[in-house]
Image: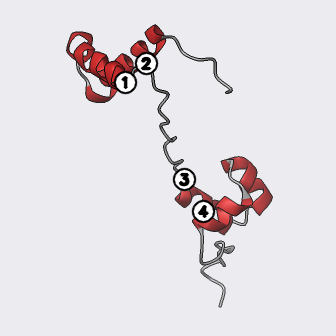
Amino acid sequence: MSRARQTDEQLRARILDAFQRDIGISAGMAQPFVDSVMRCFAGEQPYFPALPRQYPVMHIKAALERGTPVKRVLSEFEVSRTTLHKLFPGGLPKLEQAANDD
């Protein structure tokens, strides 16, 4: 386990902060919910999956269409080659030809 186990107080503080930030309620209003969550999972180690990462697909597409090398796009946007191909299942966007080319 890469993170040290959090104490009861640290976990309560994180849940309370999330209620205040995400719902916008005061600490006093949030406390009963925090207590309820803590009772619900008492003695357990539940797994909460990470939220899926959101990729700036339009920015990546624009970079590829400008002719930015794929290696640079991978580095700049911190994506793997596999992920890049998943984002563009029909093939990677190609360098746009100038509109005046005929």
- Could you tell me residue 36's position as x and y percent? 27, 21
Identified at 45% across, 16% down, the residue is 11
Q: CA distance from mark 3 to mark 4?
A: 10 Å
Q: Mark 2 or mark 3, which has the lower sequence index?
A: 2
Q: Looking at the image, is mark 3 or mark 4 nearer the viewer?
A: 3
Residues marked 2 and 3 touching at CB (< 8 Å): no
Front-lying residue, 66 or 19: 19
Could you tell me which secondary element the residue under label 2 belongs to? Answer: helix
Q: Quadrant of the C terminus?
A: bottom right
Residues marked 1 and 2 touching at CB (< 8 Å): yes
Q: Looking at the image, is mark 2 or mark 4 nearer the viewer?
A: 2
Question: Would you name the residue on which mark 3 appears?
Answer: 56
Could you tell me which secondary element the residue under label 3 belongs to? Answer: loop
Could you tell me which secondary element the residue under label 1 belongs to? Answer: helix
- Could you tell me residue 86's position as x and y percent? 61, 66
The label shown at residue 75 is none
Q: Mark 3 or mark 4, which has the lower sequence index?
A: 3
Identified at 51% across, 11% down, the residue is 7
Q: 18 above or below 48?
A: above
Amino acid identity at mark 4: Ala
Amino acid identity at mark 3: Pro
Within 10 Å of the Cα at label 1, are there few (<14), some (14-19), or many (20+) other Cα atoms? Answer: some
Quadrant position of residue 74: bottom right
**Residue ranking furthest to the bottom:** 102
Amino acid identity at mark 2: Arg
Question: Would you name the residue on which mark 1 appears?
Answer: 18
Within 10 Å of the Cα at label 3, are there few (<14), some (14-19), or many (20+) other Cα atoms? Answer: few
Question: Would you name the residue on which mark 4 appears?
Answer: 62
Q: CA distance from mark 2 to mark 4?
A: 38 Å
Identified at 72% across, 66% down, the residue is 67
Amino acid identity at mark 1: Ala
